[in-house]
Each structure stands twice: as structure tokens, then as C-alpha cells.
Amino acid sequence: EVQLVESGGGLVQPGGSLRLSCAASGFPFSSYAMSWVRQAPGKGLEWVSGIGGSGESTFYGDSVKGRFTISRDNSKNTLFLQMDSLRAEDTAVYYCAKGGIPHWGQGTLVTVSS
Amino acid sequence: DIQMTQSPSTLSASVGDRVTITCRASQSISTWLAWHQQKPGKAPKLLVYKASNLESGVPSRFSGSGSGTEFTLTISSLQPDDFATYYCQHYNGYSWPFGQGTKVEIK
């Protein structure tokens, strides 16, 4: 069974940084691309960033390009999202999601506020 | 970039009704389409992948169809547990565009 468990969310001030993690199990992690998807309060789903199975290819949505960095550690079956220069509009629940047939984690809340 | 457009945005229906949600892609995506159900405060849940394949454990009253640019999700007989928001998603490649969502409400 695919399991994805996010952690690292919390309250951060505008301009601050936060690092999200996603622990994966139940599938051959290094064989699959992974993504981060977010959902602002009361809004729809927005793809944030994706990474290839080997970690060499990374992709970003326009709203986070230059501020967020996606990475992975295949030896630990873990996905990361480094979020810098955070803004109020980055406030959202962040979901880790598996590529191929998409599966979701339970999400972690990031709140950017002073 | 590929855009996904769902209709309607909100749908009011009664238990037992047949419900259809439409999703259109701005260009052909073959059958690289998934449907997800989301309830308030919960993570999305995969219902259908590859346009018409039901995820394991999903009730058979759900079905998906379509290819190219036009897709539908049908609930054959709406149940109380089905009142939720539904999203379509194109998932081939590294950018995952989503539809804006369809909220299914109690009539």
C-alpha cells in the first residue's frame, strides 16, 4: 500500500523559510517522479513542483519559481521542499503526491503570517 | 501549458440522482486524466485514473470516460457519502494541471 507522510509545516513570518519532508513507503520510490501540490484555504488544488525519479530533473510552477527547491533522498525514500522568501499567499496545505497513478499524503499546513 | 476546465462549478442533487461532471483539456491529453474526491479538511482521494480505470476500493457507482480533450465522471446513483468536491487532473509529465473543482451539494 502506498503511504506518504508529510511533516515540517508550521507558522512562519513573511520572508522566512521552511523545509517540508515526505516519507514514502509501499512502492519503489526511486522509480517514480514525485510532486508537491498545495491548497490555499477555500481554494482548489495547485501543482507546485515536481522531480524525476533520479532527482536530476526538477520543475516548478510560476508562482514559486526561484523561491522553492524540490529535492529527494532515494536512500531514505524521502521527498523535500525547501521554501524560501515565503509570502502570505503561500499559506496552504501542502500535499506530497506520487507520480504515475497519483496518490496523496495527508498534507501539512504552512501558515505565513506576522 | 495545458489548461483543465471543469463544469459545472457547483451541482445540487438528491440521493439517488445520476450525476455527471465534465472536464475539458485545452489540448489532447490522450487518456492521461485522473479524478479525485475531496471532503472538507481531508486530503484528496483518487477515484479514477487513465480516464476510465477505477481505483481499488472505489464503489462501482463511479465511472469515468473520455479521451483527447473531453472527459466525464459519472455517479450512477448518488449516495450521502458522495457529497464532496471533485477535481480532474492531467498527470502525464511533471506539471499537473487541475480543474477548478465541482462541488456536489445536497439539493
Image (cartoon, coloured by chain):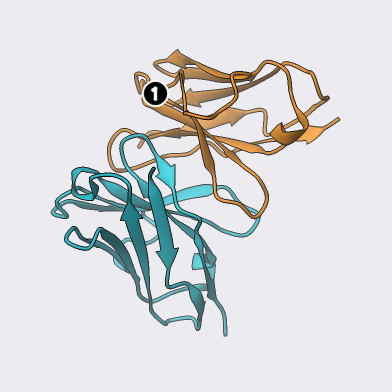
Chain colours: A cyan, B orange
Element carrying mark 1: loop
Q: Is residue A54 above or below residue B86?
A: below
Q: Residue furthest right?
A: B107
Q: Which residue is mark 1?
A: B50
Above/below status of B89 relative to A75: above
Q: Nearer the viewer, residue B43 or A67?
A: B43
Chain letter belonging to callout 1:
B
Classify residue A4 as left or right of residue A27: right
Q: Position of residue A2 (x, y in %)?
A: 38, 45
Q: Residue at x 25, y 58 (%)?
A: A77
x and y percent of residue B77 in the render?
Answer: 73, 18
User: How crowded is the residue under tag 1: few (<14 C-alpha within 10 Å), some, or many (20+)?
Assistant: many
Q: Percent x, y for residue A14?
A: 48, 81
**Vertical arrangement, residue B90 with respect to residue A8, above or below:** above
Nearer to me, B107 or A5:
A5
Measuring 38% from the left and 33% from the top, which residue is drawn there? Answer: B2
Q: Where does residue B94 sit, x and y in percent of width and height?
A: 29, 43
* Residue at 44 percent of width and 26 percent of height: B25
Please give the name of the residue rendered at 22% of the width and 63% of the height, measured from the top-left corner. Answer: A76
- What type is the residue that disc 1 sits on? Lys
Marker count (numbered): 1
Where's the C terminus of chain B, which quadrant? top right
Image quarter of the N terminus of chain B:
top left
